[in-house]
Image (spheres, rainbow, N blue to C red):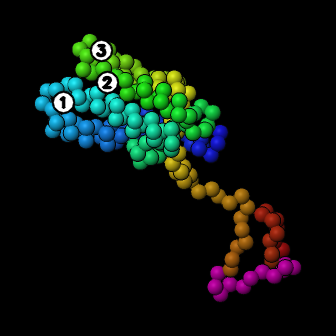
Amino acid sequence: MTEEGVGAVAEPSQRLVARIIDILIVGVPIGLGATELFPRETAQRVVAPLAFAVAFFLYEAVQVAIWGRTVGKRLTGLRVISVTGERPTVVQALVRTAIYTLPPAARPVPVLNILAGIFWLAENGLLFEGSYRQALHDRAAGTLVLDVRSPAPGPEEEPSSPGPVEAEPGEMEAEPGDPYLVDEPGSEQP
C-alpha cells in the first residue's frame, strides 16, 4: 500500500457522520433554492431530489477523484482509496458515486422511490458485513474507506533497560572501582 493507504478501515459511524456533513453541504442550498424558485410541492417532490442527485454526484465524484475525500470525509479523518492502496481512479470515483446517488434521483417516481429506499438501505447495510466494511458502491468500484487520522498515543512503554541513576543533591556519586558499587542486580555487596 502507498502512503495514502496507511490507516485503519473506517467505522460505519465515522462514515455516517461524514455523509451527513456532505449531505448538508449539498442538500441545504438545493432545498432552499428549489423552494424559492418553484412551488413548494414541486420543489420537494421533483426538483430538489433530482437537483440533489446531480449536484451530489458532481460534488462527490470530483473530490474523490482529485483528493480521495470529500469535505465531510476530511473533517472526520477519512479517505477513499482503491483496493490496491492508491488514490481512486476517475472511473472508480464515478462508479462509486453513481451507485450512491441514483436512489435519490428515483424519488419522484412513485414505485421507484420505495425500491430506491430499499436498495439504499441494503447497499449501506453491507458496511456491516465483512472485515473491510465495504458498501455496495465500494465493492463495485473497488474502493475502501480508511480512517487516516494519526493513531491515538498508546500506553507509555517502560524503557527496555534502566538508564543511569542520577544522584540526589547532597549525595555522593559512586566512582568506578568503589567497593560499594553494585554492578548487577542480585550481586552481593561487601
What residue lies at 34% left-to-right and 22% top-to-bottom?
103
Give the spatial CA distance, label 3 vs label 1. Answer: 18 Å
How far across and down, in percent of the image, does residue 14 sit? 42, 39
Mark positioned earlier in the residue sequence (1 or 2): 1
Q: Residue furthest top?
A: 111
Question: What's the residue type where badge 1 is placed?
Answer: Ala
Question: What's the residue type where badge 3 is placed?
Answer: Leu
The answer to which image quadrant residue 87 occupies is top right
Q: Which residue is mark 3?
A: 112
Q: Residue furthest right?
A: 177
Mark positioned earlier in the residue sequence (3 or 1): 1
Give the residues in magenta.
168-179
Q: Which residue is mark 1?
A: 43
What residue lies at 63% left-to-right and 33% top-to-bottom?
84
How far across and down, in percent of the image, does residue 156 sit? 59, 57
Residue 147 seen in the current view: no
Q: Which residue is mark 2?
A: 105
| Closer to us: 74 or 183 | 74
**Callout 1: SS:** helix
How far across and down, in percent of the image, does residue 124 sit? 41, 25
| Closer to us: 142 or 39 | 39
What residue lies at 37% left-to-right and 27% top-to-bottom?
101
How far across and down, in percent of the image, does residue 95 sit? 48, 26
**Callout 2: SS:** helix
Magenta-span inclusion, residue 165: no
The answer to which image quadrant residue 172 occupies is bottom right
Question: What's the residue type where badge 2 is placed?
Answer: Ala
Quarter of the figure with the N terminus: top right
Give the spatial CA distance, label 3 vs label 2. Answer: 10 Å
